[in-house]
Image: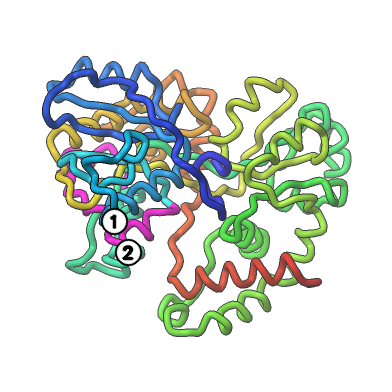
Amino acid sequence: MMNRRTLLLGTTGLVAGSVLTGCNRAANPLQVELLAGAIPPEVLNEFKKTTQFPVKFQTLGQMQVTFQQLQRWQQTPDKPPSWIRWPWQQASRPLTESQRLVSLGDYWLKRAIAQDLIEPMPLPEALLAPLPNQWQQFVTRDADGQLPIGEAPTNSLWAAPYKVQSLVIVYRQSQVPQLNKALGRPESAVPFQQWRDLLNPVLRGRTALPNHPNLVIGLLQKLQTDRFNAVFDVSASRTSSVAALTQRLRSQLGDAFAELNQQVRTYDSTTALKALVNEDVQVVVTWSGDVQLALQRYRDLRVAMPEDGSLLSADMWVQPKETELSEAAKAWIAFCWQVGPATQISVAGEGLSPIFLSESVLDGTSEQVSFPEALSSRRKMAEVMQRSELLRPLPDAMQAAYFSLWEQLRTEEV
């Protein structure tokens, strides 16, 4: 959710948490911190009813906040001493609970590992069975948080994904006839069947894109190579200078940016949907999880996921540093991967549980999981998501080159 999760360049403050469940006053309950609205209350309550373990659920406002909290937990507190801190300062205290899970977006996973903020998660093979192999591979990282090349003793599983969303195009239904006429399609056709439809002249100066280099540069690469993730020499990207990598990216993508940029009215990760409702823009590219409330409130809005594949982002459970992966934590993760709770989690947002995103589930040959009838309206979405891409973590020099190129392209004539 670009404005909720998300890949914001600024900082945000901690939203006051609220204990949703868990009035049990056991000395050491499992502490689970999650985004407000990410998990339906019914799922939280059902787990509490059926588990033998005491648990408390705490809500936070944005995914970036959870990463900042992981950082604060590893800091030595400054004066005054913790025993005289005011209640609203408690979030800055070092972590004292021995069992805790925190919801984190995949965008922050690499940094959380590299900064030594989280622990590997030794989940048993039987518990992992419902999670498709591609998702197990994506959360298996080396000690730097990178996707490993080959097998190595340092490779560990670091997270448990529980919900997946995709990059989508949001538009107004009332504009469909005009859009389809410009795209040369029947008036009743679904617009934006491909990402290249964003380049149609009718959308010049009428598009809102996310305000983040990884997403915009990924989109440029999709338009050029049909892949959001760059195809580059990993070893070269780790040894080349940032300036050299920036120049290389500019030579590859400068012209493509000029073509796309003329379509853009604003790069906005927070208020783009409001601009769409106010008819200041005609289309918005954003995360599917960010549009649910707007779709409920404004009946004219529609969502398109281009059939040539999208970019995916996952919400994950991670284990903070110096905590244990308790039996209660394993039980909660396993509960989220059961078909019933996973269906409810999927229904609650414009996304899907990863347990439904495998070829065997979608073609009905899986012995572990069946695609739920309650999600039948999202089967096509699932099929597109199954052949879509997760945004791969970049080596530090390449990430710096992305930001450098972004600054150049946004401030210069290309």
* Residue drawn where x is 56% and y is 55% of the image: 9
Which amino acid, by three-letter code, is at mark 1? Answer: Gln
User: For the residue carrying disc 2, how many other residues have a C-alpha within 10 Å: few (<14), some (14-19), or many (20+)?
Assistant: some
| Residue displayed at 13% across by 32% down | 28
Viewer-nearest residue: 14 or 122: 14
Give the structural element (helix, strand or loop) at label 2: helix
Tell me where residue 117 appears, x and y as whole percent: 29, 55
Residue 364 visible to the viewer: yes
Color scheme of the displayed model:
rainbow
- Which quarter shows the N terminus? top right
- The part of the image, by quadrant, that contains residue 151 is bottom left
Q: Position of residue 355 (x, y in %)?
A: 35, 36
Residue 38 is inside the magenta segment: no
Q: On the picture, is 52 further left or further right than 210?
A: left
Q: CA distance from mark 1 to mark 2?
A: 15 Å
**Count of marks overlaid on the render:** 2
User: Foreground residue, 3 or 393?
Assistant: 3
Question: In the rendered structure, which segment of residues is drawn in magenta?
Answer: 107-133
The three-letter code of the residue at mark 2 reads Ala
Q: Quadrant of residue 276?
A: top right
Find disc 1 in the rendering and name its residue.
75
Q: Is residue 121 magenta?
A: yes
Q: Is residue 43 above or below residue 259?
A: above
Q: Residues within 10 Å of mark 1 (few under 14, many from 20)?
A: few
Q: Secondary structure at mark 1?
A: loop
Disc 2 marks which residue? 114
Q: Position of residue 241 (x, y in %)?
A: 51, 84
Query: Which sits earlier in the primary sequence, circle 1 or circle 2?
Result: 1
Give me the residue at 64% from left, 58% from top: 216
Residue closest to the eye, 324 or 198: 324
